[in-house]
């Protein structure tokens, strides 16, 4: 869920910020909006792009990945892993953002969060590059598909406290299945696909299963014509 955040006047005169590309500065501000109340956000470029650059078709996931790496190199964000999921932590988030009623739901426990921030001079790499195809094996294609599935699962990380593992597993299996468009997964057929909205719709459809209709059937059966 997006949140209202504060931009201090000194942000604009900060030399570290001023050395960033303009779009990278905008990305950094956007991370505040979509981080939790402790400055934690899923590290998936797909998820981040879908939130901050929803309507910018000229900005790719690769662009977002490049800017995230630049923010990490400048130690403005810290990468970490917790319970098999990958995240970014916005450094100095609590120093610059006043959150009067912090959520009691922690993506990462505070003690673990503090340890990552204390050791942020040597952060763990959270984002993985696609492997180059090996000649004649097609392994690179398989790796890329797994990367996309991993990115999808990381996009659901903010909702692990709201939905059960079994619901998220079925949701993932449905939306990462091949679509009618060659080389794409179902969720990739939809411009501006929104995980939060789709999960809410999924749960509504799940309730109809008690009447003998599965969620996937209610969502369009094969996914190719689904608009729910």
Image (cartoon, grey):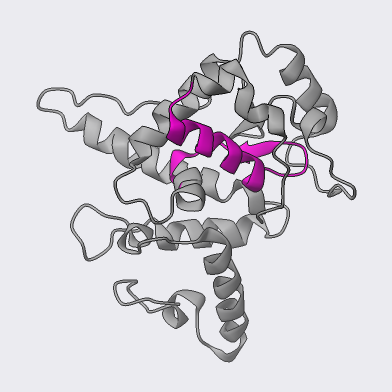
Q: What residue occupies the far bottom of the structure in this picture?
A: 211
Determine the residue located farthest toward the top in the rendered image.
121
The answer to which image quadrant residue 180 occupies is bottom left
Q: Residue at x 53, y 26 (%)?
A: 126
Q: Does residue 31 sit above or below 225 in this rendering?
A: above
Q: Nearer the viewer, residue 94 or 161?
A: 94
Q: How many numbered discs, if any? A: 0
Q: Decide which of 128, 62 is in the foreground and name it.
A: 62
104 is higher (above) or lower (below) than 122: below
Q: Residue furthest right?
A: 100
Whether residue 80 is visible here, answered yes or no, is no
Q: Residue at (65%, 49%) from the top-left corner?
A: 158
Q: Is residue 25 left or right of residue 166?
A: left
Q: Quadrant of residue 108?
A: top right
Asked if residue 78 is among those painted magenta in the image, a careful observer would answer: no
Image: 188 above or below 19: below
Q: Quadrant of the C terminus?
A: bottom left
- Check if residue 35 falls in the magenta segment: yes
Q: Residue at x 48, y 56 (%)?
A: 172
Q: Position of residue 137 (x, y in %)?
A: 15, 28
Is residue 8 among what the camera can see?
A: yes
Residue bounds of the magenta highlight: 20-46
* Quadrant in which the N terminus appears: bottom right
* 141 relative position to 222: left or right: left
* The one of 115 and 215 positioned closer to us in this rendering: 115
Q: Position of residue 155 (x, y in %)?
A: 53, 48
């Amino acid at each position: 869920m997006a949140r209202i955040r504060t931009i201090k006047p000194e942000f604009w005169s900060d030399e570290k910020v001023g050395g960033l590309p303009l779009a990278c500065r905008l990305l950094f501000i956007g991370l505040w909006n979509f981080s939790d109340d402790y400055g934690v956000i899923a590290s998936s470029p797909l998820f981040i792009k879908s939130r901050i650059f929803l309507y910018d078709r000229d900005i790719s996931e690769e662009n977002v990945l490049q800017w995230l790496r630049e923010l990490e190199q400048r130690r403005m964000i810290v990468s970490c892993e917790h319970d098999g999921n990958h995240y970014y932590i916005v450094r100095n988030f609590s120093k610059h953002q006043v959150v009067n009623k912090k959520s009691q739901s922690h993506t990462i426990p505070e003690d673990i969060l503090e340890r990552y921030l204390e050791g942020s001079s040597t952060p763990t790499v959270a984002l993985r590059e696609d492997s180059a195809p090996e000649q004649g094996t097609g392994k690179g294609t398989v790796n890329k598909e797994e990367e996309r599935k991993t990115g999808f699962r990381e996009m659901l990380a903010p909702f692990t406290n709201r939905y059960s593992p079994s619901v998220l597993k079925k949701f993932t299996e449905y939306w990462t299945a091949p679509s009618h468009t060659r080389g794409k997964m179902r969720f990739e057929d939809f411009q501006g696909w929104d995980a939060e909205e789709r999960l809410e719709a999924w749960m509504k459809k799940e309730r109809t299963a008690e009447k003998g209709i599965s969620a996937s059937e209610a969502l369009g059966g094969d996914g190719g014509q689904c608009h729910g």
